[in-house]
Image (cartoon, grey):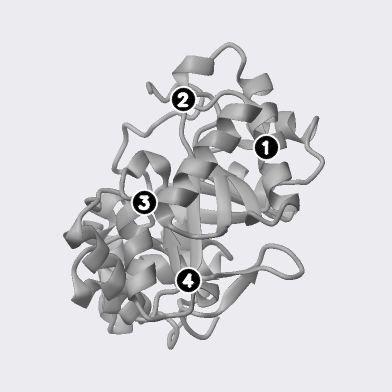
Amino acid sequence: MKNLQSTYPLTRDVGIPCIGYGTWLLKNDVSGAEAVKQALSAGYRHIDTASYYGNEEAVGQAVRESGIPREEIFLTTKLWNDVGTYEDALASFARSRARLGTEYVDLLLIHWPRPDAFRHCWQRRNAELWRALEHLLKAGEVRAIGVSNFLPHHLEELFQTAEIRPMADQIELSPGYLRREAVEFCQKQGILVEAWSPLARGGALTFPEIGEIARRRGRTPAQVCLRWCLQHGTLPLPKTQTPARMAENADVFDFALSDTDMALLDALPDRIGDREDPDNPGF
C-alpha cells in the first residue's frame, strides 16, 4: 500500500481503497457534508456510511460537490436492523441510494447479524437479505456486497444459502481487541476485514505501549494503530472531523512497524470493555 488510493481487491474488477473515512456521528447537515469534503480534499477516496447513521444526504452532497468524478470515490452503506425480508432490503437500499443521490453504491453491507427484532430467526433473515444483495449485485446497482459485525458462526450459516460469498466483513478491531478467530476465518475464506474503531474508541491513543512505539518511530499513536491494521492486511476506518487529524491518519505509508512492534501490539490486553455482542447487540 503506497497511498490512500491503493486498493485491496474485492473482486477481479473492484478494488477498495485501503483506508476509509468513517462517518459515524457526522450530522446530516452542512457540517457533515463539509467534513466529508475535507476528507476527500485530503485524499480519501473511500467513504463509509450507513442508513442508521442518518447522514447519507450529507455524504451524497459532499461527493457531488467535491468535483471528484464519482467513479473515483468508493461509497459504502449498510442495511439497518429493522430490515427483515428480501423486499424490505430492496426498498431500504432504494431509499439509501436516493438519499446518497447516486446511481450505484460500491459496497452494500448487512449491518448486524442478529438484531433484537430477528433474534429467533436470524438465519432466515440474513439469508433473505443476502439474496437481495446478490440481486442488486447482479443488477449492477451495487459493485460489491458484504456484511458487518458477523462472526464465524454467522458467516457459516450464511454460506449455507449464499450463491456469492461475502467480499468484506466490517468488525470492531484495534490493538487490544484483535478478534483473532474472526480475522483468521475471514482471511482464510478470502473475505476482506474492515476495522471499525481502529483506535480502540480513542482509548488506544493513551495506551503507554502504543505511545512508546510512536515515540521511537517519530509517529503518533493513531498512526501506529492504523499502520498495525494495514500490516495485518485489514482495512481501517478512522473517523474525525478535524482536518489536521485527517491528514495525520493518511500519513502512514512511509514507515513500517517491526516484527517486535507488531508482537507487542498483538499482545495488548483489552482496556476498553463493554463491547457490543453481535449475538446480543441490544438493538
Element class at badge 2? loop
Q: Kindly identify which residue carries mark 1.
A: 132
Bin the neighbour count of mark 3 within 10 Å (Cα to Cα): few under 14, some 14-19, many 20 and up: many
Residue 71 or residue 5, whichever sits in front? 71
Image spot of residue 172 (x, y percent): 44, 46
Image spot of residue 78 (x, y percent): 49, 44
Q: Are marks 3 and 2 in contact (CB under 8 Å)?
A: no
Circle 1: residue type:
Ala
Circle on res. 56: 3
Residue at point 72% right, 43% down?
Answer: 135
Bin the neighbour count of mark 4 within 10 Å (Cα to Cα): few under 14, some 14-19, many 20 and up: few
Element class at badge 1? helix
Residue at point 38% right, 70% down?
Answer: 64
Q: CA distance from mark 3 to mark 4?
A: 41 Å
Image-based side of 208 in relation to 92, left or right: left
Q: Earlier in the sequence, mark 3 or mark 4?
A: 3
